[in-house]
Amino acid sequence: MAVAAPYNEKTDEQKAICEMVHQFADEQIIPNAEDSFPEPIVAQMRELGLFGVTIPEEYGGMGLDLTTYAMIVEELSRGWISISGIVNTHFIGSYLLMKFGTEEQKQRYLPQMATGELRAAFSLSEPECGSDVQAIKATAKKLDDGDYEINGQKMWVTNGLLSGLVFTLVKTDPSAEPKYKGMTCFIAEKEPGVSENTGKYAGFNVPPKLKKMGYKGVESTELVFDGYRCPAENILGGEEAGLGQGFVQMMDALEVGRVNVAARGVGIAQRALELALRYSQERKTFGKQIAQHQAIQFKLADMATQLDAARLMTMRAARLKDAGERSELEAGMAKLFASETGRFCVEESFRIHGGYGYSKEYEIERLYRDAPLLLIGEGTSEIQRMVIGRTLLKRHKI
């Protein structure tokens, strides 16, 4: 009779890293989660090497895979999704560089990105278009001296002010058919923290950060390009290989970005369940803990079951990508289910807390404001269903 090997969800290395980040979240993130940018926490994240998790060791990073990164994001999001947001756009920027960048671009940016000294953002959405990426209006026109002049507006850029690099998708050939073939990704450099850039970054401006319901620990901004000059060497992948490839590059990055958002949904759902389990055993009604009431136990059971399913789906999507397989279907499913699970678990935990859930003295109030972001970021739930449906039909065409 065959002897089954012990079941392990994580390798020893993954366990050690997750335990470290879990402790960091408990001791440093959760007690200090407020509605402002957490500079001291970010400084500690730099010391822990969390900005270079997936960057290869040759460029100063840890060289870890997407699966391990997703586990780290879950732990950070369990603490505060604003923290995972600071890392997320940076991660997508480094992914774009690692997969599509020239060696010169990698050498120039990745070592500073690995330490967190240089932080990245990426920009697709505009004031008049979000999920309909092919409708973007921002343009880049080649000048006589070989540089490109970028004009247009971008919207909802996480890390838009404090980043030093913004991977920006613009139109370089407005007449291209299909439209996506006329789009190019530029590595737009700017001065971190500066609203009106001057000198070589003139024409790249960042209006005051957008006021939001939640997700307030990281800035979301508009970007305004007004005659901003960008050298051809800053086209992602170089001018020869990268011109007209921006849409394909960004869609590839969104695939891993959706795994990231799924992990964030798992993290916030995990924290909501923990808070519900604790409160339901502390609060008493009718002479007993509310956890002893069947209605509350049903809520806890549904929360835990959906959370477990969301985590498994997220890990599957990450492992497929690590194995070099297409995972647009699985990543879309994971993002859809995990983000909805995050919302569901937070709302159920909020209900379990009763009136106290409405008080800012209780952590669940912040989670209740933060969770809706996951239903929108990296494509709404409705867009995910469209992606899933189209991919299913493509895979099972008769």
Image (cartoon, grey):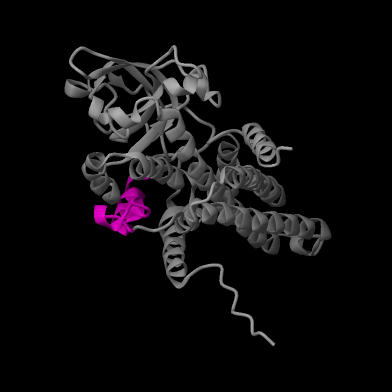
- Name which quarter of the figure residue 329 lies in: top right
Residue 202: x and y in percent read 22, 19
Nearer the observer, 113 or 248 = 248
* Left or right of residue 372, residue 75 in this image: left
Residue shown at 50%/30% (left/top)? 212
Q: Main secondary structure of the magenta part?
A: helix
Residue 249: x and y in percent read 43, 35
Name the outermost residue toward the bottom.
1
Is residue 190 visible in the rendered image? The answer is no
Name the outermost residue toward the front.
398
- Name which quarter of the figure residue 86 lies in: top left
Residue 159: x and y in percent read 38, 35
Against 24, residue 352 (above or below) is above
Residue shown at 28%/35% (left/top)? 164
Against 77, residue 242 (above or below) is above
* Region rendered in magenta: 38-62
Nearer the observer, 134 or 73 = 134
Is residue 364 visible in the rendered image? The answer is yes
Residue 229: x and y in percent read 24, 19
- Name which quarter of the figure residue 340 lies in: top right
Residue shown at 25%/52% (left/top)? 59
Nearer the observer, 16 or 6 = 6
Against 356, residue 397 (above or below) is above
Give yes or no for residue 40 being in the magenta stretch: yes
* Left or right of residue 218, residue 354 in this image: right
* Left or right of residue 148, residue 257 in this image: right
